[in-house]
Image (cartoon, rainbow, N blue to C red):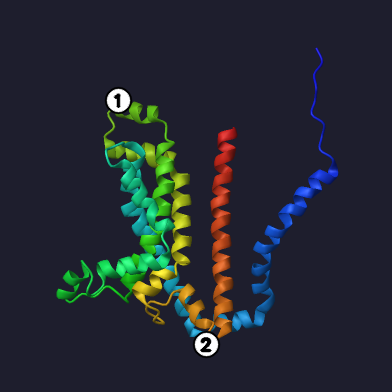
Amino acid sequence: MQVSYAKPLPRWVKSLWVVFALPMLLFISLPLISLFVRTSPQNLLLGLQLNQVQQAVILSLLTSTVTTVISIILGTPVAYLLARHRFRFYRVIDTLVDLPTVLPPAVAGVALLMAFGRRGVFGVLFADAGFAIPFTLIAVVMAQTFIAAPLYIKAATIGFTNVNCELKQAASLDGASKPQVFRYIMVPMSWKALVNGSVMTWARAMGEFGATMIFAGNFPGRTQTMPLAIYIGFEIDMNVALTLSIILIGFSFLTLVIVKGILHRQYEDVVE
């Protein structure tokens, strides 16, 4: 019996794929490289000393961290519900969770304003109590949470779904309560997915622009996050825009390194 082996592709065919891939790779890399070419280390240091830049960085770090914590606290029950239960309106809830990720950010901002604005459906109740949400730090966190929390929920849902049901059943048979099963089985077995979702939520909140602009405004030192300061920087001081853009690239790069590192370790665990 003769065994036929596929002939290896010629070298020129392999090189052809590189040629086809090069335009898109250049399109992605050249704008990023241009930011660093246009910004000298001296200008970057000067930009970091600007009060507007420091305020925007601190505000973004603060609100993104608060958003991530809120997403974990409020999003984990939703993720567990979607992962472990099938109910009548499951697809409706699942679609509702996904919706903010595909909505234009401006639409999300208008929706938040119509709901919680001074004349919004629910904002009137807060206004009557003398408590205004729009154009405050709370509005920044709400806008970021609306846009970014679904990333954590979907990642956590995948993590909870992948936990072996036999482990959960065995723990229940040994007398573990549902909170104990969740704490000692579900969370440890899905921690990588939870960390990935948290990191991606933090990064998405850091880069949120449209919903924040409409619902929270662009007030330096109060609601002006880094993306909003970049927008104003184009009109007032280009060095501010370039400095903050490089900072955001650094945060985004660090986020991807963390996520890819965790995913790589998870792949190695599966292979082993």
Query: Which residue corresponds to the image point at 68% horizontal and 58% vertical from the top-left?
Result: 24
User: In this picture, is 129 found above or below 22?
Assistant: below
Residue type of the residue flagged with mark 1: Leu
Of the 4 image quadrants, the one containing the C terminus is top right
The label shown at residue 236 is 2
Residue type of the residue flagged with mark 2: Ile
Q: Position of residue 32 (x, y in %)?
A: 64, 68
Q: Is residue 58 left or right of residue 253?
A: left
The label shown at residue 143 is none
Mark 2 lies on a secondary structure that is loop
Report the Cα–Cα distance between label 2 and label 1: 66 Å
Tag 1 residue: 173
User: In this picture, is 158 found above or below 57?
Assistant: above
Camera-near label (2 vs 1) is: 2
Q: Position of residue 117 (x, y in %)?
A: 26, 72
Query: Which residue corresponds to the image point at 57% horizontal and 40% vertical from the top-left?
Result: 267
Comparing 94 with 62, the one in front is: 94
Q: Examine the image and state in which quarter residue 3 appears.
A: top right
Q: Position of residue 150 (x, y in %)?
A: 39, 54
Q: Residue furthest top?
A: 1
Q: For mark 2, does the 10 Å Cα neighbourhood hold few (<14), some (14 to 19), or many (20 or more) residues?
A: few
Q: For mark 1, does the 10 Å Cα neighbourhood hold few (<14), some (14 to 19), or many (20 or more) residues?
A: few
Mark 1 lies on a secondary structure that is helix
Q: Is residue 84 left or right of residue 236?
A: left
Mark 2 and mark 1 lie on one chain; the one further toward the N terminus is 1
Q: Is residue 126 left or right of residue 169?
A: left
Query: Which residue corresponds to the image point at 40% horizontal and 68% vertical from the top-left?
Result: 106
Q: Residue furthest right?
A: 11
Q: Residue furthest left?
A: 128
Comparing 27 with 85, the one in front is: 27
Q: Position of residue 135 (x, y in %)?
A: 32, 77
